[in-house]
Image: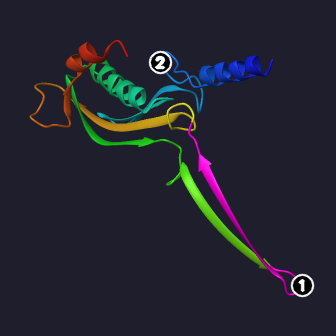
């Protein structure tokens, strides 16, 4: 009986950690993309997923789609970052020491050791990859941060 409860719990955790199909976020905090126009040809694209790799890849795909929807040919990533929702040092082991003294003059010291084991790939929940892009028509400049939108879609279209 205990074995079946453990298997059911693992299946539930796995189901909660799965990715959703590529598409727009349906509400605040939902997985998927959001696009925020900043200027006429500047956009902030956010993709939220459980996997850092998928969030990055899908944000890049959405950047290419936005570029082509505008009638432009290429985009340049101006800024990019990934928010994993974890605090610095979140995970691993820790040691803590505390002390106190009672009213009878006695002192006590406590020592605790803790170990954090990340489940589901090291992230406690969805990660968010954010890129800010500038789009433009014409030939792509010789810049490592510039991407030809059609090439990106051809290579990443299945993600």
Q: Residue furthest right?
A: 104
Question: Residues at badges 2 and 1 in contact (C-beta under 8 Å)?
Answer: no
Disc number at residue 52?
A: none
Quarter of the figure that contains the N terminus: top right
Estimate the spatial distance between the alpha carbons at disc 2 and disc 1, rounded to whole Å. 63 Å
Question: In the rendering, at what x and y percent does residue 156 appear?
Answer: 30, 17
Question: In the rendering, at what x and y percent does residue 69 appear?
Answer: 31, 18
Q: Is residue 117 magenta?
A: yes
- Describe residue 60's horizontal placement relative to residue 52 as left or right: left
In the rendered image, the vertical position of residue 58 relative to residue 86, given as above or below: above
User: What's the residue at 68%, 61% (across, down)?
Assistant: 112
Question: In the rendering, at what x and y percent does residue 100 appear?
Answer: 78, 78
Return the residue nearer the eye: 59 or 67: 59
In the rendered image, the vertical position of residue 74 relative to residue 116, given as above or below: above
Write down the region rendered in magenta: 101-118
User: What's the residue at 73%, 75% (across, down)?
Assistant: 99
- Describe residue 6's horizontal placement relative to residue 91 as left or right: right
Is label 2 or label 1 in front? Answer: 1
Which one is earlier in the sequence, the residue at label 2 or at label 1?
2
User: What's the residue at 22%, 16% (across, down)?
Assistant: 150
Query: Dot 1, how many residues are within 10 Å of its Cα: few (below 14), some (14-19), or many (20+)?
Result: few
Disc number at residue 23?
A: 2
What residue is pinned by disc 1? 103
Q: Could you tell me how many numbered marks the image carries? A: 2
User: What's the residue at 27%, 19% (across, down)?
Assistant: 68
- Residue 38: tell me if it is visible: no
Q: Quadrant of residue 81?
A: top left
Q: Quadrant of residue 124?
A: top right
- Describe residue 35's horizontal placement relative to residue 133 as left or right: right
Question: In the rendering, at what x and y percent does residue 155 appear?
Answer: 25, 16
Q: Is residue 69 magenta?
A: no
Q: Residue furthest bottom?
A: 105
């Amino acid at each position: 009986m205990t074995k079946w409860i453990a298997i059911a719990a693992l299946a539930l955790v796995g189901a909660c950690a799965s990715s959703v199909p590529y598409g727009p976020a349906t509400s605040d905090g939902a997985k998927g993309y959001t696009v925020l126009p900043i200027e006429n040809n500047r956009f902030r694209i956010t993709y939220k997923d459980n996997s850092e790799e998928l969030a990055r890849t899908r944000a890049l795909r959405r950047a290419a789609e936005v570029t082509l929807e505008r009638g432009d040919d290429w985009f340049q990533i101006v800024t990019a970052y990934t928010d994993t929702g974890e605090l610095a040092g979140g995970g691993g082991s820790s040691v803590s020491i505390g002390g106190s003294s009672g009213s009878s003059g006695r002192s006590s010291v406590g020592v605790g050791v803790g170990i954090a084991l990340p489940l589901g790939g090291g992230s406690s929940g969805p990660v968010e990859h954010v890129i800010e892009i500038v789009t433009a028509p014409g030939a792509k400049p010789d810049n490592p941060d510039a991407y030809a939108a059609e090439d990106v879609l051809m290579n990443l279209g299945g993600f």
